[in-house]
Amino acid sequence: MVSTTENSESGLTTRASAGPPILSRPRVLVVVSCLFLSLFTAALDFTITSPAIPTIVADFRSGSGYTWIGSAYLLANATSSPVWGKLSDIWGRKAMLLTAVAVFFIGSLLCAASTNMPMFLSGRAIQGSGSGGVVILVNICITDMFDIRRRSMYLGLTSVVWALASGIGPVLGGVFTQLVSWRWNWWINLPCSALAFVMLIWLLNVDAGANRLSFRSGLKRLDWLGIVTILGVTLMLLLGLNFGGETFPWKSPTVLCLIVFGVIMIPLFVLSEAKYARFPIMPMRLFKHRSNVASLLVCFCHGFVYISAFYFLPLFFQAVKGTSILMSGVWILPIAIVQCLTGIATGFVIKHTGHFCEPIWTGMAILTLGFGLFIIFDDQMSIVKIAVIEAVAGFGVGMNFQSPLIALQSHVAPGDFATATATFGFTRNIATSLSVVIGGVIFQHSMQTHATTLTSVLGDETAAYFDGSSAEANVGLIASLPVHQRNAVRGAYVASLRSMWILYICVAAVGLLASLMVNKKSLEGPTDRKSNGPVSESLQSHELQQITQR
C-alpha cells in the first residue's frame, strides 16, 4: 500500500511506502529477469570493448581515439549516475528506467553504425549516460520491490550479473572482432535492450499508487545548482586525469586547470547540498553517520581494486604470457566465476542471518590477500597457479559487491533509499573511472623507467613501440621479437604491472580498515515488521517531515 503527500505550493509529491509490493513468485522471477537483462547489457559494455579497440582505431585511422573509446563511456557513466536517482523520485522509477534503456539503445545504435571516430565517441558517451541510469535504477527498483532481508539476496545476484558480463565481455568482444566485425559488439545490444524495454513496460510496476509530478513541477524540484556543481567536479577531474600524459603533458595549463578547478568545485558542491538545495541530489545527512561514510569508502576501495583485474589482467596475459586476445578473455574467467558463486552465497547468507558486517570484513581481507598475490605474477608462473590466485581475489570481490550497499541502506530512512543508492553507484563509478586512469598512468610511467634498458636491447626504433604511452597498444608486436628481446620486453611489463598492483593492494588495505568502522545492525525481515509497524511509519523520509512541518 502506497500513500502520497502533496504540497500544492511547491508541486512536490512524496511517496511513503508502507512496505514493498506483494508479487507472486512467477511475476517476481520475470520482473527481476528483465531488470537483470537490462543490467547485463549495460555492464557488458564495460569490458566487451577492450579487445576491439585496436581494430576500431585502425579502421577509423585515429590513434588519438584509443584512450577516449573507454574514457568517453566511463566519463558519461560517472557524471550521469547521481542525477538518475533524483529524477526517479520526481517522475517515477519505471519512466526513468525506460528512458535510461532507450538512451543506451540510441548510443549503441550510433556506435554500431559509426562512420568516423567523432560519431563513435558520441555514441559511447550517450551509451555511458544511459548505462549510468540503468545500473542505478535497477538497484533502486530492487530496493523498492523487497524488504531489506530479501533485498540482500537479489542485490547479491546483481554481482552475478556483473561477474558474467565482466567474464563474458572480453571473450565475446574477441570473438566478434576476430570472426565477424567489431560493430557486432554494439549490434548485440539492440535486441537485448529492445526486449528489456518491452518487458519492463508490460511487467514493471514499482510506482503503483504514487502520483507523479507534472514535467513542469518536476523541473522546479530539481537541484540545478547541485547538478551543475557535481557535473563540474566529475568532468573536470576525470578529464584532467584522462588528458594528462596522453593528450597534454601533466604540467600543461589545460591539465592543471582542469584538476585544480575540479577540486575547487568539491566544497562548492558540498555547500550547495548542505545550505541551498531544497531537495538535494546527494543529501549531506547521508554522511553524518560514521558507518555510512565507512560503507561508501569500502564501496570506493572495492570498485577501485576489482575493476583493475578485468582491465589489466588481459594485458598481462597478452603481453607476458603471449596469449591471443580471445584467450586473454578466457583466462580471466576464474575470477569472474568465483565472483558469481560468492555473490550468490553472500546474498543468501545476509538474507537468512540478517548480518552484513561479517561478509564485508571477510571480503575485504580476502580481497587484499588476493590482489596482494598478483605481485608474484611473471612469465614463468603456470596458468593453474594464476587461476587459483584469481579465484582467491574473486572471493573478496563477490563478498563485497553489494554488501556495503545493504549496510548503507540499513542506516538511512526509507525516503533516502533512492538517493543513498544513487550515491553508492556514483561512488563506485568514480572509483572505477579513477582506477583505470591512475592504474594506466602508473603502468606507463613504470614502462618509461625501463626505456633506457629496452633501447639498449631493442634499439631506438623498436624500443619506441614500448615506451610509456605506447606499451598498451603494441602488445601484439612482442611475439614477433627475437627470444632475448622478447624476454627483455616481457620483464619490463612484469615489473611495470607489479608497480601497479602495489597501488591496488594499498587501496584494498584502506578498504579493509574502513570496513571495521561499519556498524553492526541486524536486518529486519517481514516478520520483524509486524511488531514494529511498517518501516515507513517508524522512519519517515526527510522530505515528508519537511512537508508536515509546513
Image: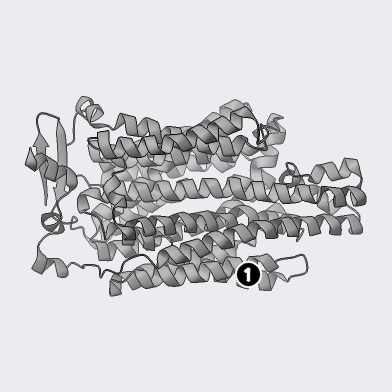
Residue 259 appears in the picture as rendered: yes
Residue drawn 61% across and 52% down?
A: 311
Q: Quadrant of the C terminus?
A: top left
Residue 235 or residue 290, whichever sits in front: 290
Q: Is residue 510 above or below residue 237?
A: below
Is the residue 19 above or below the residue 335 in the image? above
Q: Which residue is mark 1?
A: 373
The x and y percentages for residue 32 are 33, 55
Residue shown at the point (61%, 73%) measured from the top left:
388
Q: How far across and down, in percent of the image, does residue 201 sit?
A: 29, 41
**Residue 504 percent location from the top left of the image:** 58, 59
Above or below — where is 450 with respect to 118?
below
Q: Is residue 26 above or below residue 383?
A: above
Count every numbered label the image shows and give the total: 1
Tell me what residue is drawn at x 35 percent, y 40 percent: 270
Q: Secondary structure at mark 1?
A: helix
Q: Is residue 95 visible?
A: no
Q: Amino acid at mark 1?
A: Leu
Q: Is residue 12 left or right of residue 466?
A: left
Q: Position of residue 398 (x, y in %)?
A: 46, 65
Image-quadrant location for residue 488 = bottom right
